[in-house]
Image: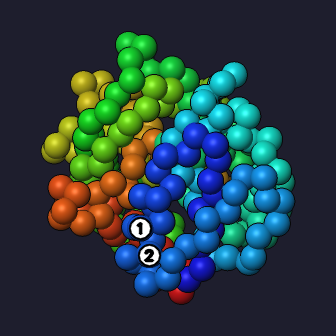
Amino acid sequence: MKTAVIVYPGSNCDRDVRVAIANATGTEPLAVWHQNSEFPDVDLIVLPGGFSYGDYLRAGAMAAHSPVMREIKQRAKKGVPILGICNGFQILTETGLLPGALLQNAGIKFICRDVNLRVETSDSPFTKAYRQGSVLRIPVAHHEGKYHADLKTLDALESENRIAFRYCDAKGTVCEAANPNGSARNIAGVFNKERKILGMMPHPERLTEKLLGGKDGKAMFDGLVAALA
């Protein structure tokens, strides 16, 4: 499986996700600089976490206009799977590849801690290795992670089974107390209509081996290998 990890000025999780993918695939991903308007054919594109362009204007707003994004939009039209994590999720919403927006957290504080996620569907290459309804422990680290969309969009995400993860408590109950940032309907990750693009705020690449404190994120990358190999 060939993977491209896009690197922007201010990215700080690109190496983390490259290590997670290399461990799952046995192949080192390509690191593609944001100014490159072309890169080789790949099976998966990852937009990593960080603070692209220092989050000036809005988180992900400037990165959405990087030269590489024109090519990524073309790859998306061809059905190439794309994973956006944290800042990558913000960039995907800014480009319109995913619906909604990521706003400043409720409480106006940067959040950096583990949260619980409930897997809402296993019907995607990103979540196929998880059981629907299972609870994961995954870290978050963001200041603008409050998912927002209008009522029509939220209802469409529900009816089309395009919500990937929701914030929940340790028992899997979706409740306000388990929502770290005020996201609408406790949404932590969403798909595009074809479920070939996933944006999520939590960082699965940070929990892929026991040395990191847990392995709940590992199945995402193992599942991608099985789906895309």
Q: Is residue 180 above or below residue 210?
A: above
What colouring style does the render use? Answer: rainbow
Is 75 situated left or right of 217 in this image? right
Q: Nearer the viewer, residue 52 or 133?
A: 52
State the mark number for residue 39: none
Name the residue rendered at 44%, 38% in the picture: 187
* Residue carrying label 2: 22
Name the residue rendered at 25%, 41% in the picture: 114
Q: Is residue 170 above or below residue 135?
A: above
Is 84 situated left or right of 177 in this image? right
Can you say which quadrant of the picture contains the N terminus? bottom right
Name the residue rendered at 51%, 70% in the picture: 125
Q: Nearer the viewer, residue 123 or 43?
A: 43
Q: Residue 3, position in %: x, y?
A: 59, 73
Q: Nearer the viewer, residue 66 or 128?
A: 66
* Residue carrying label 1: 19
Tell me the element at label 1: helix
Q: Is residue 25 above or below residue 129?
A: below
Could one spot residue 22 in this view of the protein?
yes
Q: Residue 94, position in %: x, y?
A: 70, 37
Q: Callout 2, which amino acid? A: Ala
Could one spot residue 89 in this view of the protein?
no
State how far apart marks 2 and 1 are (Cα).
5 Å
Query: How crowded is the residue under tag 2: few (<14 C-alpha within 10 Å), some, or many (20+)?
Result: some
Q: Callout 1, which amino acid? A: Val
Q: Quadrant of residue 148?
A: top right
